[in-house]
Image (cartoon, coloured by chain):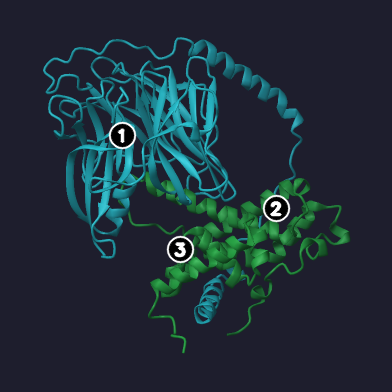
Chain colours: A cyan, B green
Amino acid sequence: MPDLEDLLREELKRTARKVQPEVLRPLRVPAPGRSWRPRLVPLAAAAAVIAIVAVVALAVGLPVSPKPAISGSPSVGLPRFYVTISGGAHGNETEAVIRASAGGQVTGTVQVPSIAQDVAFVTAAADDRSFIIGAYEGQNLTSPGGAFDLRLFQLRISGAGKPGHLTELAPAPERLDDFQGMALSPDGKLLAVSLARYSGPYTIGTLQVINLATGTIRTWTAPVKGPQYAPGAPSWVDGSRMVAFTWLRAIDPLVYTVAGVRLLDITAPGDSLTDAKLIVPRGTVGAGSIKSALITPDGRDVIAVTLRELSPLASSHTVIVQIAELQAGTGRLIRVLRTQTARYDQGGYITLQASLGMLSLGSAGQYVLVQGIQFGWLDVGGPDPGRFTLLPALPAGQYVTGAAW
Amino acid sequence: MEADPADLIRSPGPRPDQAADDPPAELADDPARYVTELFRAHHLELVRLAVLIVGDLASAEDVVQDAFEQLHRRWRTLRKQSSALDYARSAVLNGSRSVLRRRSVARRHEARIVAPKLPDADAALVFEQRTELIEAFRALPARQREVLALRYYVDMSVADAAATLHISEGAVRSTSSRGLDALARILPSRIPKEP
């Protein structure tokens, strides 16, 4: 294609030439570095403090109590409260908002110290009272280079849904470049975190299980050579023994396609994510392809949200979003629980794609918080499968990216 | 098309065993100074390369500054299997990739539908008057953009592009071919028909 090559060469140079020397900011020469030796003492002290905090403050783990009885609840077994992450009233902060599941009324809010406005992550314990919130710390998300950290906080709420203070947890995942999600085990002691690190052109998909009582962290990684994969949002199976996650194929920087769902036995030896068994193969499910999935606590079913775009070449996008129940092990479609069709402009479509998610499955596996075309809860294993109830979270037109119950 | 001095700073030329970009003798014992001189000499070219990948000037400048600081810190520990300018270009491409990833993270987690913001007025300079071909180029996957930018903006050989990107020459050829095919598909009306 010599003509195209010439044209491309000419256009690239013309575009690059728009950057002229006079508009460049001068390079800043870094200050000479200090010796690392003097820093050892404060580092050691900090490490000691962290260790003590980890052992003493977290030795009891997260309390697990029986689910409270729900009087007057529209659905037996529905978690009483859910937490969403949103921007604060002043528009420059991040808040965790606690709402009653029955009517959606706000019972309390708490500020989350995240460097990225509106961006934090939440997972719930089975006791309907405890939540873990992950917040970014480090460089701004849009700045080049460097990774960021995830700070973990425990949020306890009262029986009336009133929040206590956030308590920072000492153990934290390793420094990361991308975060897919986290899930607290049913006993509240283990936190599974799906993340990715980047090394040059390589994506290193990583799953970490953090023991919140002892601070120990176990890590599994995806192979770097060949096609690169990362684990999607995790969910727990069989108590605290197994973790399921969508298996994401890295296509481009942070562009993933779902290549199935895997199940990892965390009690087995090994540190490779490929040891995890493929329980849902890649492929079309119902009307579309899987965007996000959670496994039910008994490990029998996978609840997935799927997307299909009917008009990929048009300027507006007509999409079908479905929530489907699949058989874990074979991926066979058991039933479609909900189907919605909607039309979006380009911006709306991109946001929808980025937001679709199975956000949180109640501990009994009956009701799931889901961001489909709308945000709400769906009966997936209760008395009325497929029943969807809208929940208030953010103003109309906005999407929930972090919610749990 | 008039020549631009920065366009003349192109492929690294001889491979490192020929020592084209190795520090001159007077700077060999002062690596920090050498890296500083290298970046000053190639600042414009590196920013332009980053602009082609990330699409805006402010981010491109940040990427180059970051790469400069990174090499400034790490120069002594780098293996001299490639030229200094290759290292700089690799660092700039890695930084550009990181910017794209972070943008994707921010976009993916963005809870609100908002119009994309340009970092500052300078950024508009690069966005305005973009041609159809550049729009199509910007829509390519990052790896294809990197390969095409090295091959057709920096005018690197396949071998040099492979060394800079730490991939095989075959991968450079196939990625380049896929990128050109994609551009040809996107822009059939712009490509003159071969006789």
Q: Give the image quarter of residue B127.
A: bottom left
Question: Do labels 2 and 1 touch, CB within 8 Å?
Answer: no
Q: Say if labels 3 and 2 share a chain.
A: no
- Tag 2: amino acid: Val
**From the viewer's perspective, is A199 left or right of A162?**
right
- Residue that carries the numbered disc 2 in the rendered image: A29
Instruction: Tell us which disc is closer to us: 3 or 2.
Output: 3
Q: Nearer the viewer, residue A49 or A145?
A: A145
Residue A79 in the image: above or below residue B178: above
Q: Give the image quarter of residue A87.
A: top left
The circle on residue A359 is 1
For label 2, the crowd category at 10 Å Cα-Cα, with few meaning under 14, some 14 to 19 and many 20 or more, is: some
Cα separation between marks 1 and 3: 31 Å
Cα separation between marks 2 and 1: 46 Å
Q: Is residue B129 visible?
A: no
Disc 1 sits on a residue from what chain? A
**From the viewer's perspective, is A164 left or right of B70?**
left
Q: Identify the residue shown where x is 51% and y is 62%.
A: B144
Quarter in which the N terminus of chain B is drawn: bottom right
Q: Say if labels 2 and 1 share a chain.
A: yes
